[in-house]
Image (cartoon, rainbow, N blue to C red):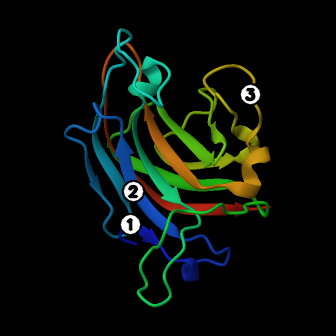
Amino acid sequence: MDGWVDGASNVIGIQGAVFSYADNASSVGMTSNFTGTNACIAGSAAKVDLMCTPVAPATDCYATFWGAAISFNLNQPIDPVTGLPVGSRVPYDASALSGFAFEISGNLVPTSIRFRVDTANGEYCSPPTQPITIGANAVLFSDLRTECWTVGGEPGETAKSALLKITWQVVTNSNAQVPFDFCVSNIRALLL
């Protein structure tokens, strides 16, 4: 609710903030709405400028112009006295899960949405052969790969014991901007 999932609201103890973020170019004019049970963003993911000068930590122009995203921290501590989040997220052990299900809706849902799970050591994402679409989606850890935009990669099941967050990313390209206006709702963990 309203950009926060309370650990007491689910039997597997997932707790954390739901938020949006973007690369510097894509953040211009981006709006977000996290009221109620929806997580929504609207804007335009920047066209990748292949002549850019990457700024660290980016190592190439695709990492500089990576797009926009909605993320959900899975294990974010709360101060017992104030009831406010404290510190940063910590790893969540998702060993009892097979993946996540969710719904996508909106006026302008791009075909380039990528679902990711992030650990402290990297990310695992949904390959183009398994697109995220309008309506109900279910993504298993076995569907995810490191560097999912290439063939191969390490499977996402190896990340299950130390997840930091899940993410819905609007992916950029070097041909044109990618406009978006969509919401993620009804997020569910899939038990084994």
Determine the residue located farthest toward the top in the rendered image.
Answer: 51
Q: Nearer the viewer, residue 120 or 73?
A: 120
Q: Disc number at residue 19?
A: 2
**From mark 2 to mark 3, how far is it between C-alphas?**
28 Å
Q: Position of residue 184 (x, y in %)?
A: 43, 54
Q: Residue at x 61, y 47 (%)?
A: 117
Question: Of marks 1 and 3, which one's residue comes earlier in the chain?
Answer: 1
Q: Quadrant of residue 145?
A: top right
Q: Residue at x 45, y 90 (%)?
A: 81
Q: Disc number at residue 3?
A: 1
Is 173 located above or below residue 132 in the figure?
Answer: above
Q: Amino acid at mark 1?
A: Gly
Is 37 located above or below residue 138 in the figure?
Answer: below
Q: Residue at x 54, y 55 (%)?
A: 102
SS class, disc 3? loop
Q: Residue at x 42, y 18 (%)?
A: 61
